[in-house]
């Protein structure tokens, strides 16, 4: 629940955030933004101050303690691309987020020439990324975690909670970017600070035209710009679900949470005394996601898991204000805030096509959860190795043929089938109200860890997913089973039809 759209204070299009709502992306490196419909709610919430200097929630918006956005840059001397030489680079990466830099780093390690194009290449990513520790351990990135919790907790309602014995962590975004950038520089990656206006394809190379008048020639183009979809093409109607969230990193007088556990989901609604608000939440519920760093410093985020259309941002903020008031959390100051909108599900891009994609632009966000950071970073070696294989010493493929082979490696039939199942899960979640959602996750987190771990981390493929579904059904209450059958029949038929039609 990570490439998105995040509006951070006065910044318009940045990217996403955490666990079930991880957020990943790059500063959008393409000037053509097609996501204007992702803007939800006002950017100027309203609050009143209490006598003790803390915020007193009194309106449908959130806290007006948010400071002006501070752009923090890495102190690196970057080797810049020299357009006067007119060289054709092996790979042009459009977008400097985690996915783009990971591919640039790994392709350049093989000795190929790489140019990374981004309007703010030194800017530290503004997103709070949360991950399961085992995911980053598998990629040898434990040194890029700054806070770790021994486990997580899920509050189903006021009387039931699940303790998840799976360590969770927040990513040190400065350390992660520094590590990637240092390796890119060491490998000879060149950087160009600009936005791409358009791409013109020739038989064996592509011309990337930038907004500063520079044209970069490349044998392969990788779009890592997130959900902008400005280079990667789609040919089917785009009607995803939307995960919408509002979060704050705040200093508080106190909070009621265990600092050794992060709150993965809190579905309780006892804070909603306003009947209109309670009814809205009953139809389309939101949950609290919280990372407590100490007894008085905490990240809090109110999240709509998935809805179509997305829940308005001011509605999310109003629910959060009510929750904080009920929990007795008095905010003294806010370090930063996040407004996130993540498209989930929807069609895959045209497969294959000349421009290669990774991350949000390639449809890689988890359709049921919004999860993407770890999944995308794990996919980077696949894309990089494929490019190196086909563009390396043998130079066996060029142009469309080369891109086609890379797309096949990124989206093999087993990954496409996995995604169909995840979209099936999203279609069911879209139809569940608060009580149905609670019943669903009550059964979900009662499954054997290998099932719910694998589902959240995209490690289960279709045969295992079938057993996952049967196990979930067996753990569900009778009411939940009836719900799944009644609301999941049409999505199931659609999934089976799509699986039958999808062939290599």
Image (cartoon, grey):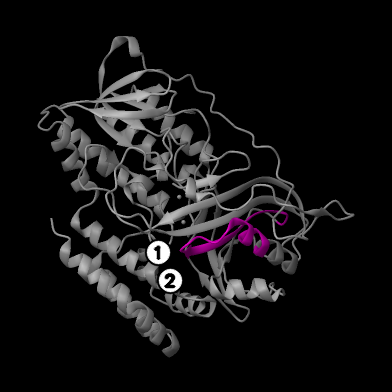
| Coordinates of residue 24 in the picture (x, y in percent) | 45, 46
In the figure, 146 relative to 58: above or below? above
Which residue of the protein is positioned furthest toward the right in this rendering?
51
Q: Is residue 40 left or right of residue 493?
A: right
Quarter of the image that includes the C terminus: bottom left
In the image, which residues are magenta?
Answer: 295-319
Q: Closest to the observer: 156 or 133?
A: 156
**Could you say which disc has been placed on residue 368 in the image?**
1
Q: Residue drawn 61% across and 60% down?
A: 316
Please report the residue visible at 39 percent of the width from the left and 65 percent of the height from the top: 453
Q: What is the CA distance from the residue labelled 2 to the residue labelled 1?
A: 8 Å
Q: Residue at (29%, 60%) from the top-left corner?
A: 419
Q: Check disc 2 and report the residue beneath it.
A: 429
**Residue 256 seen from this side:** no
Residue 460 image point, x, y percent: 29, 64
Instruction: Where is residue 439? Give x, y as percent.
Output: 48, 80
Q: Is residue 198 left or right of residue 54?
A: left
Residue 326, how many percent across, how many down? 73, 69
Above or below: residue 471 compared with residue 292: below
Magenta span includes 409:
no
Say above or below: 325 vs 44.
Answer: below
Front residue of 387 and 346: 346
Q: Secondary structure at mark 1?
A: loop
Residue 68 picture quarter? top right
Mark 2 secondary-structure assignment: helix
In this view, the residue in front, 150 or 159, is 159
Question: Vertical placement of 334 versus 437: above or below?
Answer: above
Dividing the picture into quarters, in which one does residue 421 lie? Answer: bottom left
Q: Are marks 2 and 1 in contact (CB under 8 Å)?
A: yes
Q: Earlier in the sequence, mark 2 or mark 1?
A: 1
For the question of whether residue 400 can be seen, the reply is yes
């Amino acid at each position: 629940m990570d490439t998105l759209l995040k509006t951070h204070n006065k910044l318009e299009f940045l990217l996403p955030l955490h666990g079930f709502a991880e957020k990943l992306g790059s500063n959008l490196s393409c000037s053509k933004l097609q996501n204007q419909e992702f803007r939800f709610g006002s950017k100027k919430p309203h609050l009143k101050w209490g006598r003790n200097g803390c915020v007193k929630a009194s309106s449908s918006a959130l806290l007006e303690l948010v400071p002006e956005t501070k752009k923090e840059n890495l102190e690196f001397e970057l080797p810049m691309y020299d357009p006067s030489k007119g060289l054709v680079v092996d790979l042009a990466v459009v977008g400097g987020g985690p996915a783009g830099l990971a591919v640039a780093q790994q392709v350049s390690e093989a000795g190929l020439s790489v140019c990374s194009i981004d309007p703010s290449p030194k800017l530290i990513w503004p997103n709070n990324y949360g991950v399961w520790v085992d995911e980053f351990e598998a990629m040898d990135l434990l040194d890029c975690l700054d806070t770790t919790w021994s486990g997580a907790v899920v509050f189903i309602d006021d009387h039931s909670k699940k303790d998840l014995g799976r360590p969770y962590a927040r990513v040190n975004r400065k350390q992660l970017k520094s590590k990637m950038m240092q390796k890119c520089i060491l490998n000879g990656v060149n950087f160009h600070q600009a936005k791409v206006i358009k791409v013109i394809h020739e038989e064996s190379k592509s011309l990337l035209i930038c907004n500063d008048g520079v044209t970069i020639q490349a044998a392969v183009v990788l779009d890592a710009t997130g959900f902008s979809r400005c280079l990667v093409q789609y040919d089917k109607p785009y009607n995803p679900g939307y995960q919408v969230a509002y979060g704050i990193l705040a200093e508080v007088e106190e909070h009621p949470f265990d600092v050794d556990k992060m709150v993965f989901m809190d579905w309780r609604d006892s804070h909603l005394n306003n009947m209109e608000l309670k009814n809205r939440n009953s139809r389309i519920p939101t949950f609290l996601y919280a990372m407590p760093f100490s007894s008085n410093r905490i990240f809090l985020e109110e999240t709509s898991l998935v809805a179509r259309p997305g829940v308005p941002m001011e509605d999310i903020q109003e629910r959060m204000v009510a929750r904080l008031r009920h929990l007795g959390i008095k905010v003294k100051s806010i370090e930063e805030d996040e407004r996130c909108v993540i498209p989930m599900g929807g069609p895959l891009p045209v497969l294959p096509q000349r421009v290669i994609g990774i991350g949000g632009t390639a449809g890689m966000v988890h359709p049921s959860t919004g999860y993407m950071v770890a999944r995308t970073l794990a996919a980077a070696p696949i894309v990089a190795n494929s490019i190196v294989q086909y563009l390396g010493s043998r130079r066996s493929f060029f142009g469309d043929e080369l891109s086609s082979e890379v797309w096949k490696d990124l989206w093999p039939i087993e990954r496409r089938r996995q995604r169909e199942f995840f979209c099936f899960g999203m279609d069911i979640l879209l139809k569940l109200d608060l009580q149905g959602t609670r019943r669903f996750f009550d059964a979900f987190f009662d499954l054997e860890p290998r099932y719910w771990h694998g589902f959240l981390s995209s490690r289960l493929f279709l045969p295992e997913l079938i057993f996952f579904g049967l196990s979930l059904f067996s753990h569900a209450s009778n009411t939940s089973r009836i719900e799944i059958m009644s609301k999941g029949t049409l999505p199931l038929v659609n999934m089976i039809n799509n699986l039958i039609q999808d062939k290599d």
